[in-house]
Image (cartoon, rainbow, N blue to C red):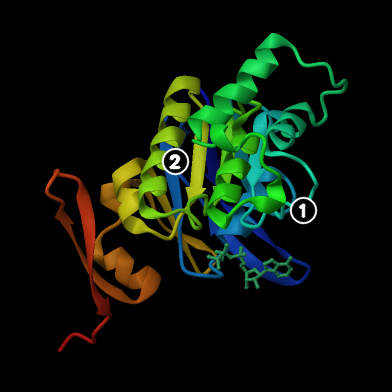
Amino acid sequence: MVTLQLDRIGAGYGRHQILTDISSPMIQGGALTALVGANAAGKSTLFRRIAGHLRGAGTVSLSGATKDDLRYMPQDTGMSAALTVYESVILALKQGRGGWRLSTTELNAVDKALHRFGIAHLAEHQLAELSGGQRQSVSIAQTLVTQPKVVLMDEPTSALDLHRQFEVLEALKSYAQETGAVLILALHDLNQVMRCCTMTIAIANGRTLGAGSTLEVLTPTLIRALYGIDARVESCSRGCPMMIVDGPARQSA
Ligand SMILES: Nc1ncnc2c1ncn2[C@@H]1O[C@H](COP(=O)(O)OP(=O)(O)OP(=O)(O)O)[C@@H](O)[C@H]1O
């Protein structure tokens, strides 16, 4: 089982300190974890710090995996190469592995990634011909084709329509369950977080505002502190918790 834990993480850019004290309980692999916070709260910065792209205080403890098993999918992956979808996923698989000959196992891994994320029908399409949502699905397939054990994804569903969001989040969930990997997703849609993510880390002002089981963290009080929004948690007709947003926070009388 893969686990990851953050202990008093700090990070910034030059003299501009963005994160000062981010900690989390032990994050268990096999399920999705959400990272939430307002715009510019430092979610991408935290991912860069965990991935080792930024230095800073504190400790990232990994067990059952090494830094080589970690993949970070940034928000804007920029796909300008003159490649087909199939070629781009092969390229992602082969990067850093040397040699271009593909084993049967590798071919199967490419096929599986294309099917898992619903883009097999786009295999022969050029990247430049894809819609924003299709590109995002390709980025996810590229990120997971090497079967990483630790995955950090920056807003992986931001370009997807409502139905595709469900499909992709379910596919990410099943990837986590099958591989025991730790998957941390920066998400803005709190209903998707409640539906799919077992744990949540909420950050504001460089610190952890809440971290633990999603339903315990995403309380109306925390939503108000994070976003300045009045909201309440109810259930959808299928029994899933969901957030009803009442509007910008009102001063209490
Ligand atoms: N390369 C950089 N150099 C200097 N400052 C940066 C850099 N990248 C981000 N920042 C600053 O760090 C702060 C946090 O940015 P970050 O991208 O981590 O936020 P975020 O929570 O991911 O935001 P969003 O939800 O808008 O994507 C912002 O004030 C931003 O201007």
Answer yes or no: is residue 233 visible.
yes
**Image coords of residue 209 (percent x, y):** 41, 61
Q: Residue at x 51, y 57 (%)?
A: 159
Q: Residue at x 67, y 38 (%)?
A: 85
Q: Residue at x 57, y 56 (%)?
A: 132
Q: Could you tell me if the residues under marks 1 and 2 are in contact, i.e. CB atoms within 8 Å?
A: no
Which mark, residue 168? 2
Q: Nearer the viewer, mark 1 or mark 2?
A: 1
The correct choice, above or below, for 231 with respect to 87 in the image is below
Q: Quadrant of the C terminus?
A: bottom left
The quadrant of the rendered image in which ligand 1 is seen is bottom right
Q: Residues within 10 Å of mark 2 (few under 14, many from 20)?
A: some
Spatial CA distance of label 1 from label 2 is 23 Å
**Image coords of residue 196 (percent x, y):** 34, 42
Relative depth, front residue between 28 and 25: 28
Q: Which residue is mark 1?
A: 80
Taking the image as shown, residue 224 lies to the left or right of residue 13, namely left
Going by the picture, which residue comes out furthest to the top?
A: 104
Element at label 2: helix
